[in-house]
Amino acid sequence: MNLPLMSLLRCPRCRRPLDAERDPTDRLNCRSCGTSFPIERGVPRLAGETYSASFGRQWNRYDVARPDEDEATFRIKTGVDPRDLAGRLVLDAGCGGGRYARLLGQHGARVLGVDLSSAVDKAAELCASFPEVAIVQGDLLDLPVAEEAFDLVYSIGVLHHTPDPRRAFAQIARRVKPGGRLAVWLYRRNTPPQEWLNSGLRAVSTRLPAPVLEPICAGLGALGSIPVVNRTFNKLANFSNHPDWTLRVCDNFDWYAPRYQSHHTPAELRRWFEEEGFADIQELLPAKTGRLYDWAYRHDLIIGSGVNFFGVRH
Ligand SMILES: C[S@@+](CC[C@H](N)C(=O)[O-])C[C@H]1O[C@@H](n2cnc3c(N)ncnc32)[C@H](O)[C@@H]1O
């Protein structure tokens, strides 16, 4: 157990530090209110899995870590070179199965990864060989972590899966220390017909039991390998065209299973950064370019694309 990282944890009930000065093995106790939290498989459990069960299932089931791709994605979606993070304190807000926490562990960063779901088990396993990476099960909506502590906070594809993305944004923004950086990637709001169709499809898919939805996602995964199909129909309904089969099926489940999925505009996310006191706010653009792609992106036609900003805290 990484005690300096554990000392950044706060009691979800009374917000005071947890007793992380000695090496706890099975419980973390609050010095102030006496609440006790279990540590299971090396992961402090400061929240229970609620609406996020589909994520626990997907990240534990599909092995999606792809080191080269993860590094490229991290650079694009945070605007940060992982090599610049050696020795820095970083919060991975919604770490999922831990692919980016592991990447930063490899580059010598000190990382606290927080996620609500049992994906933390996968993340802890993936990051086990990096003692400077710690994983915690906790809720971003009431984040049990010290404020103004981190050099970098990033959240990739997470806040739109909470019931209150603006609140979650405020919670993670307040964990950035003055002069530190925040990077957030959220789903982009598409055109009204695309949004209506997606809401209709998800109204059905989110009610399906996972063993029924998974084969459907695999079927969509097969469609996603056919270029002519995936370049046309995925402008209507989302399905992944990732070249890797496992990632295609996982991406599809990631889209159609979660209970909450909200879509946002660039102006909205920029405003959130401003409201939380960030400066030097920059929009981060996708790696993919080309005249047709750029035009479709600017007109909000690419389903599953993002709004992505980076800022520095005053
Ligand atoms: C699409 S996944 C992204 C995971 C990771 N950032 C990645 O890109 O690999 C979204 C994650 O957000 C987590 N999540 C949703 N609501 C949360 C909350 N309130 N607090 C913490 N994590 C949450 C889910 O459990 C899930 O692992």
Image: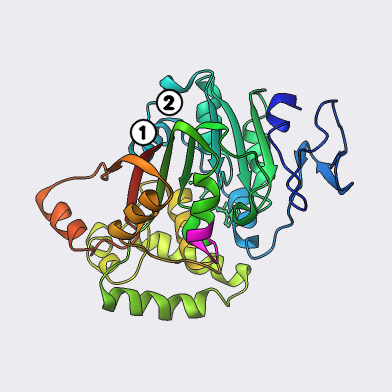
Mark 2 falls on what kind of element?
A: helix
Q: CA distance from mark 2 to mark 1?
A: 7 Å
Q: Horizontal placement of 237 versus 126: left or right?
A: left
How many residues crowd around disc 2 within 10 Å: few (fewer than 14), some, or many (20 or more)? many
Q: Horizontal placement of 35 versus 223: left or right?
A: right
Colour mode? Answer: rainbow
| Residue reaching furthest to the left | 291
Instruction: Pick the quarter of the image with the C terminus.
Output: top left
Q: In this orientation, does residue 254 appear?
A: no
- 69 is higher (above) or lower (below) than 170: above
User: Mark 2 belongs to which amino acid?
Assistant: Pro
Q: x%, y% of residue 132?
A: 64, 23
Instruction: Pick the quarter of the image with the N terminus.
Output: top right
Q: Nearer the viewer, residue 251 or 222?
A: 251
Q: Horizontal placement of 163 versus 266: left or right?
A: right
Q: Nearer the viewer, residue 180 or 250?
A: 180
Q: Are marks 2 and 1 in contact (CB under 8 Å)?
A: yes
User: Residue 312 occupies which quadrant of the picture?
Assistant: top left
Q: Horizontal placement of 246 versus 226: left or right?
A: right
Give the total of numbered labels. 2
User: Mark 1 belongs to which amino acid?
Assistant: Arg
Q: x%, y% of residue 248?
A: 43, 54
Q: Which residue is mark 1?
A: 75
Circle number at residue 82: 2
Of pointers 2 and 1, the one earlier in the residue sequence: 1
Q: Residue at x 58, y 33 (%)?
A: 149
Q: x%, y% of residue 273?
A: 38, 49
